[in-house]
Image (cartoon, helix red, strand yellow):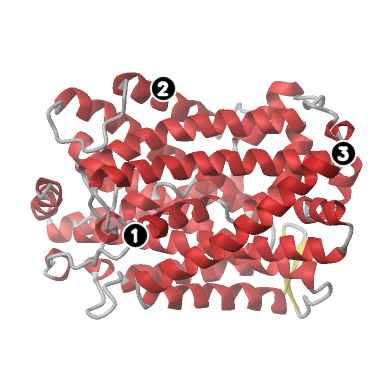
Amino acid sequence: MSKSSEPQEFVRVLARADVLALAFGAMIGWGWIVLTGSAILDGGSVGAILAFVVGGIAVLLVGLTYAELAAAMPRVGGEHVYSYRALGHAASFICTWSIVLGYVSVASFEAVALPTVFEYLFPGYAVGHLWTVAGWDVQASWVAVGVIGSLVMMIINYFGISTAALLQKVVTGLILVVGVMFVTGSLFTGEAVNMQPLFASGESGAIGGIVAVLVLVPFLFVGFDVIPQAAEEINLPYRDIGKVLVLSVLMAVVWYVLIVLGTSLMLDGEALGSSALSVPAAMEAVFGGAWAGNLMVLAGIAGIITSWNAFYIGGSRAIYALAHSGMLPAFLGKLHPKYKTPTNAIILIGVLSTLAPFFGRPALVWLVDAGGLGIVIAYLVVAVSFLILRRREPDMPRPYRVSCGIVVGILAVLMSLGMLFAYLPGSPSALVPVEWLIFGVWMVGGLALYGWARGRYGREMGDRIIRASYEQD
């Protein structure tokens, strides 16, 4: 256990712009390019916007609980520390392992999204049939693009947080510039008639359509929670950590609403149904040229990079925190002596995300849904931890204190439960068997590792390490 009990050596190098780009860039990955059209078709234009507003409010409430806890306990692993302090050892593992599933699912999603977007830029590039998954032919060149991208992102994160943060700022800036071009152009050239129907009118009705879009929200908005994961690398006053976290969520809500609005103004239902990528198609309609669609695809690739990068950071720090406290094998809690990165945890995420392209494009939906369930479980546990600590430790120093905290905490719990029920059997958007399989294998495998680590290292050492981490504050 000696390796995992060494003093932590993360370096505080992330400034305010780095932190904001990290969280906002994580939340505006590739999903807005590939899922906006289906969201409008499922919920209607106004229904989709309403779903993102409601989901955004839910995420913001959870984000407020994170903001207070992150400022109060700015330690690596984020929810790992909060849930331990409130609920204990086992609950802390389940919470953190669930959010790691969300992070790994996003990293793996991007490894599938990258070769998918290449098809838009280079039609017919996919050759070399390997096998068929769920009716989709997996091609060797298609897989190669995803594998190479995954390895490149792993290498970037291996060599330090400063390199990853610089990449994040530059690429997030590109996305914002293209986004502003699209939204302003669509407001001037779009037509309100294209927004019909305003709400879904199929078998599930308006409510069912909105719920179908709501299921996407946890996956699309996951990313603000990367800030607490990297708390020991942030060079800001603790109060400002909470402020930046909340700001990043608000920016993401505005982004998704404006992207849905712009797309629905430019494309009617028929155009949405026939376009492989609706947002680039809408961008092309705004400026009347293929170059504009390709520019939007490049912004989508930039989103893949920002999201991929952020979740390598968040996922590796969460895995490190579990290993450092004796809940996973100790080798995953190793920091590189020079680069100060959790190298073995980064390599583990790299291996898992590199496997995803071998399952083809159907893995996109599987990863969204299975990972979303893990994310919502973690959000629920953090919201509960927030309420418990407000009651049990009212005098705990809270540099960023949420107004009406008990009300916010209760609403965050209720919103998290509402999102959780959307994944369960009986819901119009319940997980399908293969998604339950992914979730089940992940949780059972994690619990097996947890049991092994607890038997090997004992609980007392892990408890001592976690307590020491938050007692420093």
Is there CB contact under 8 Å for labels 3 and 1?
A: no
Helix, strand or loop at label 1? It is loop
Residue 400 x/y as whole percent = 26, 36
C-alpha separation, residue under disc 3 versus residue under disc 1: 44 Å
Residue that mark 3 sits on: 269
The residue that appears at 86% across and 45% down in the rendered structure is: 273
Q: Tell us which disc is closer to us: 2 or 1.
A: 1
The residue that appears at 40% across and 37% down in the rendered structure is: 63
Q: Residues within 10 Å of mark 1 (few under 14, many from 20)?
A: few
Residue that mark 1 sits on: 15
Residue 216 visible, this angle: no
- For residue 171, above or below residue 425: below
- For residue 100, above or below residue 431: below
Q: Earlier in the sequence, mark 2 or mark 1?
A: 1
- For residue 263, above or below residue 329: above
Residue that mark 2 sits on: 411
* Kind of residue at disc 1: Ala
* Kind of residue at disc 2: Leu
Is there CB contact under 8 Å for labels 2 and 3?
A: no
Residue 241 x/y as whole percent = 31, 47
- Residue 169 left/right relative to 129: left
Camera-side residue of 25 and 247: 247
* Kind of residue at disc 3: Gly
Residue 167 x/y as whole percent = 48, 70
